[in-house]
Amino acid sequence: MKPIVYLAIAGTLVGCQANQDNLSSFVQQTRENAVGVVQPMPEPQEPPSFSLNAAALKDPFRQPTAVALGKDSSTSAASSGGPNLNREREPLENFELQDLQLVGVMEGNRGRWALIREPAGSVHKIQAGNHIGSNFGQVIAVNETGIAIKEWFGDDFSGWRNDSAALEIKQDAESEDGAPGR
């Protein structure tokens, strides 16, 4: 059986030899007919250099601080026309104003009180002078329909600027829990 296998392999190799001649002539003809000449690549030019010195520029990702505003950090911002940064923060200062809801107003011997619901559902009692909101807000007045608030915003140019805001009782709609808005 071995001689038959050897004979088959020898026949196959002899048969491939004839095709090798055709392949060699095709490769030689293709090389002779090749026409393109590749031009060399131009030398790369160095781009003009640019240097940016941003050390003196404002960082857009940081809140302005007393130091960045040119103020002595040991002096409270309140003495320079801003909020008192050294006082203890109140619970409602952890929330944005738009997340808080005024649910009622009470009046007693010690003045008017506003009832504020936080997002978790807890209700807090505050009056004029209390602080509210994340922008150093302070309640200026409480009346029958709402509260007036003064908020402070850090400003890179003048230190601090304030703006007024308000929370009002929604009288015409019902609150989320189905209770009347007043």
Image (tube, grey):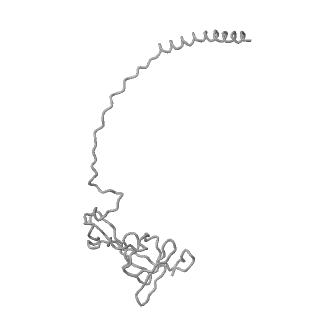
Residue 38 horizontal side relative to residue 72, left or right: right
The image shows residue 150 at horizontal and vertical percentages of 35, 75
Q: Is residue 122 left or right of residue 134?
A: right
x, y percentage for residue 109? 42, 90
Q: Residue furthest bottom?
A: 109
Residue 148 location (% of width, % of height): 39, 78
Which residue does the image show at 46% across and 16% down from the upper left?
A: 34
Residue sitting at the far right: 1
Q: Is residue 48 left or right of residue 21?
A: left
Question: Going 60% across and 10% down the picture, which residue do you hit?
Answer: 17
The image quarter containing residue 93 is bottom left
Query: In which image quadrant can residue 178 be found?
Result: bottom right
Residue 64 rendering spot, x and y as whole percentages: 32, 62
Asked if residue 136 is positioned above or below residue 145 in the image, the reply reads: above
Where 112 sits versus 86, above or below? below
Q: Quadrant of the N terminus?
A: top right
